[in-house]
Image (cartoon, grey):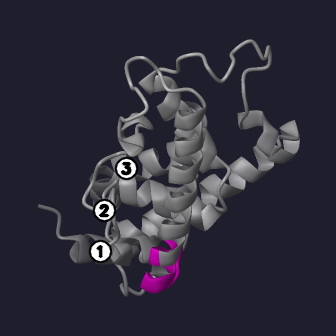
Amino acid sequence: MLDERSAVEQARLGDERAWRELYDAHVDLVFRLAYRVVNDRDAALDVVQEAYVKASRSIDRFRGDSSFRSWIASITLNEARSWARKRARARQVGLDTVAEPADGSRGAAEAVSDADLAARALAFVDTLPDQQREAVLLRTTEGLSYKEIAEMLDTSEGSARVSYHHGITKLRSHMAQLMDAGPTPENGPGRDRATAAGEPVGPDAASER
């Protein structure tokens, strides 16, 4: 098992093996975080690479108040946000890009599959304010505690809790509207909407703790 504190100290001294151990220990998490923000595999890989480069350059400023995991995740999220903002400016993307298909051929009464509902849920999450979006993703998909989320978002635990609450409430309301607009024969109007929406079921999927 990785001795993170020791590895960080060795990395500060330029030990490449220690950096590799830190990289291997957390790369899967930071890639998932980057991908959920940028929604592009190659871009996510670039974001992860840049995050580790920045971390290596600023390792002397890492005080150890939080875990290295939280620290590298925070850097990754900042890099991913920056990439997403640049893409949005370049493509002049607005919130309307996550609406119905361009041909408008699908009416509200047409059946939507669970996969489509999940895609719509993620599309809606993408429109949330940064902190709400990331709190929802970190909580529901990674199962992180509010303390860990707060460390990654560089905010207080209370603020992380509020951001998650606002974000998940908006998501549930949005998905309920979709379900009311067009229940499928499989789902039916009585099916639990959070489940049909593809909302991950975690330790806090239904209520905050």
Residue 166 in magenta?
no
SS at mark 1?
loop
Asked whether residue 33 appears in the rendered view, the answer is yes
Check disc 3: other Cα within 10 Å, few if <14, some if 14-19, many if 20+. some
Which stretch appears magenta? Answer: 153-161
Please state, as top left, top right, bottom left or bottom right, where the C terminus lies in the image. bottom left
Nearer-N-terminus badge (1/2): 2
What residue is shown with label 3?
141
Residue at the spot 22% in from the left edge and 76% down from the top edge:
6
Q: Nearer the viewer, mark 3 or mark 2?
A: 2
**118 left or right, relative to 125:** left
Q: Are marks 1 and 2 in contact (CB under 8 Å)?
A: yes
Q: Residues within 10 Å of mark 1 (few under 14, many from 20)?
A: few
Dominant secondary-structure state across the stretch colored magenta: helix
Identify which residue, 121 or 141, lies in the foreground: 121
Residue matched to label 2: 204
116 sits to left or right of 157: right
Q: Is residue 158 magenta?
A: yes
Q: x%, y% of residue 23? A: 35, 54
Amino acid type, mark 2:
Asp
For the residues bearing labels 3 and 2, Cβ distance under 8 angstroms: no
Q: Is residue 49 visible?
A: no
Q: Mark 1 = which residue?
A: 209
Residue 65: x %, y % from top left: 37, 87
State which tag comes first along the sequence, 1 or 3: 3
Q: Quadrant of residue 107?
A: top right
Q: CA distance from mark 1 to mark 2?
A: 7 Å
Dot 3 lies on which element? loop
Is the residue 108 above or below the residue 37 in the image?
above
Q: Is residue 107 left or right of residue 204?
A: right
Q: Give me the residue at 30% from left, 62% from top.
A: 204
Q: Residue 162: where, in percent of width, then height?
A: 51, 76
